[in-house]
Image (tube, helix red, strand yellow):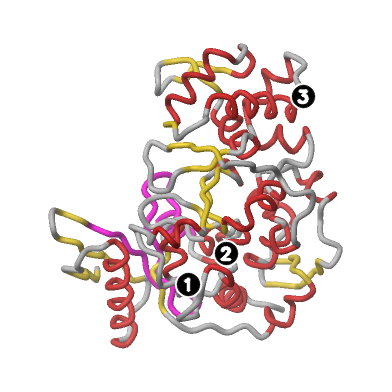
Amino acid sequence: MIDRRRIARYRTHVQQLDRERGDLGDTSVLDLGAQETGPDGALWALAIRGVEAAKAGADPAVERELVWLWTLRGAPHCYRRSDLPQVAAAVAPWSDADAAKRIFDAAKPLKAAGIPILEALDAVAARMRAIVTEPMAKGEVSGRLHEVMPEPYQRFCRPCDTVHLYEQPFRLAAVRAGLELEPRTSPPVLRPVPGLSPAETFEDRLDPVRAYLHLCGPATVKEVAEYLDTPVKELKAHWPGDAIEVATEAGARWILAGDEAALRGADAAGTRLLGPYDLFLQARDRAVLVEDPERRKRLWPVLGRPGAVLVDGDIAALWRPRKSGKRFTVAVEPWRPLAAAERKAVEAEAERLAAFRGVALTGLDFAG
């Protein structure tokens, strides 16, 4: 029987949160994509995995080796640029049924109009490719698409008080159109990738199903399907043949056969300030990571997520950055008493965060 602590330590190790040095080529989260949400997003995820060159104002040389795309769940993710053609193939929907699930309510009017979902994504992509010939803000792209796309592709958006394309087809069509996101732009700016076309095949490490089982396993079929926004039936048709079932405290779960020994012998040490959308916190089995339901609500609220303090593979506290003028502080809410050495390690990580953001740390506030 594999307990939750062993699972958390396995993920800490396989996601390289216990290493001090690494480079982009050997950083495993880039196989599945590091989510870019908030100021402590993808580059911070790389920094806490030992990629020294990753900073909020990234070195242009580092930035050229990375690419930002709307992919899984329509969220912006960071990948190695050298993997781009394979990633474009790996994240593409498998079928109309898969694509329909990924675009949510946008599928209904398309189906009613007799438009196959993959065909619809290709139609949006073709228009986007023609429109975005140089860097262009999302709002301008959306406005231009509104002028040329027929009614089934569009909806009235109450927050914007206007009619525009459904959001998920817009996002998922961008990679099909050969478009990337300019890093650190808000609102997002899209730009063309010259000559991009999806690869015919892709390496196993870039297969989102295998990557999830490797980095966030052991997991249930339903959890993997939820992470990918795909129907369970579709996922089962693409389930790895070398996935095996293991018994855990949370019930039967699956992991790649090659990872079983690492899971059973897993250990991890070190302290990290995980960003709110770090892959470690993106695993769909939240009750495995945090047993207490009230604490889960605090770590994963609907709005305004905090980060998590990971100590030796266990979530030991929450943290939030606070900036006021020239002051930058980190507020920490411990979930258990922290030893003096652990507090010192948290302080060191807060200093790393401040350096990443290019500011000086002026305070570390522990609640309680």
SS at mark 1? loop
Tell me which residue sits at (40%, 16%) in the image. 161
Evaluate if marks 1 and 2 touch, with contact meaning CB atoms under 8 Å apart: yes
Q: Is residue 243 left or right of residue 343?
A: right
Q: Position of residue 254 (x, y in %)?
A: 75, 65
Indicate whether 63 appears above or below 362: above
Q: Position of residue 354 (x, y in %)?
A: 27, 66
Residue 116, labelled with which disc? Answer: 3
Which kind of residue does numbered mark 3 sit on? Pro
SS at mark 2? helix
Report, in whole angstroms, how far the alpha carbon at label 1 lies from the one at label 2: 9 Å
Looking at the rendering, the stretch of residues picked out in magenta corresponds to 293-322
Q: Position of residue 363 (x, y in %)?
A: 18, 69
Which residue corresponds to mark 2?
29
- Of residue 160 and residue 339, the one placed in the foreground of this image is 160
Report, in whole angstroms, how far the alpha carbon at label 2 lies from the one at label 3: 33 Å
Q: Quadrant of the C terminus?
A: bottom left
Which kind of residue does numbered mark 1 sit on? Arg
Q: How many marks?
A: 3
Q: Quadrant of the N terminus?
A: bottom right
Q: Is residue 277 magenta?
A: no
Indicate whether 70 appears above or below 8: above
Residue 49, labelled with which disc? Answer: 1
Evaluate if marks 2 and 3 touch, with contact meaning CB atoms under 8 Å apart: no
